[in-house]
Structures are given as structure tokens and as C-alpha cells.
Image (spheres, rainbow, N blue to C red):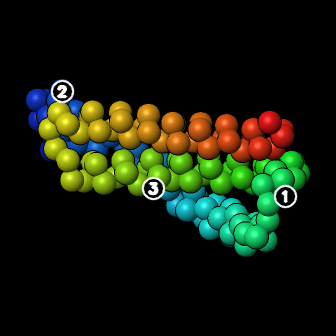
Amino acid sequence: MKMRTDLRRVRGLGSAREGTGHFWLQRLTGISNLVLLTAFVVLLAALHDGTYSEVRGALSNPLVALIMGLVVVSAAIHMRLGMQTIIEDYIHGGLRVVLQILNTFFAILVAASSLFAVVKMSFGA
């Protein structure tokens, strides 16, 4: 027995069947953030009294630069997913689509500019 009307199916109201993937991606990025941000805080504590050249020296280590890049990517994905959930839950109407697009572009902008800074510091520019 079908509970959805034809009009409801055409309008796309109902399950998009993407909730489980969104849920797991948000949980996985949360776990990765826990590990990666711990490494970031340890690095931050170790370099808090360091000079600019010492920070550049630390970031020139490929492992440190890789961890910083992973922090940026994981945090940006997690940030986007969290805001997407808030927008879906509390915003209704045509504004929802606009905010989802802006949310995605903002996450890309934050990730790209942060990765650029990490790469620039890593290669000594």
C-alpha cells in the first residue's frame, strides 16, 4: 500500500534517501576532527612562544603540513554538514536553496584559503 500521493512524489517531498550517508559522514568527520584537532592543539602549544621562522620550520615538515591540511579539510566538511542540517531543520521556502548554496561555497572558500596558507607556509614562500 502506497502512502505517498502522485503530487507528493512529483514535488519531491519526502525522503531523499540520503540521510544515512549524511549521518555517517558527519560522525566520521567528527571522529577525525577529534584526532586531528588534538594534534593541532599539541602543535599549537609547542609553538605558542615560537617565532614566525620557527612556525614555518615546523610546517616545512611534510607530516605536520599533511596533518594541518587534513585538519582543514575535515573541519570544513564537518562545518558544511552541520550548517546543512541547521538550514534544513529551521529554514523553509526558497531561501533554503540559496542558503545551502552559500553554505557550500563558504565551506569551499574557507578550506581553499586555509589550504593555500598551509601550502604557502610549508614551501617557505
Task: Of the two numbered discs 2 and 1 on the same chain, state the one appearing first in sequence.
Answer: 2
**Label 3 crowd bin: few (<14), some (14–19), many (20+), radius 10 Å:** few
Q: Residue 89's spot in the image, x, y percent?
A: 24, 53
What's under tag 3, amino acid-wise?
Phe
C-alpha separation, residue under disc 1 versus residue under disc 3: 40 Å
Q: Residue at x 22, y 33 (%)?
A: 12
Q: Is residue 115 left or right of residue 61?
A: left
Judged left or right of residue 49, residue 58 is right
**Callout 2: SS:** helix
Q: Residues within 10 Å of mark 1 (few under 14, many from 20)?
A: few
Q: Circle 1 is placed at which residue position? A: 54
Residue 35 visible in the current orientation: no
Q: Which residue position is annotated with label 2?
A: 10
Q: CB atoms at circles 2 and 1 under 8 Å apart?
A: no
Image check: 113 left or right of 101?
right
- Asked if the residues shown at circle 1 and circle 3 are in contact, with their CB atoms under 8 angstroms apart, the answer is no
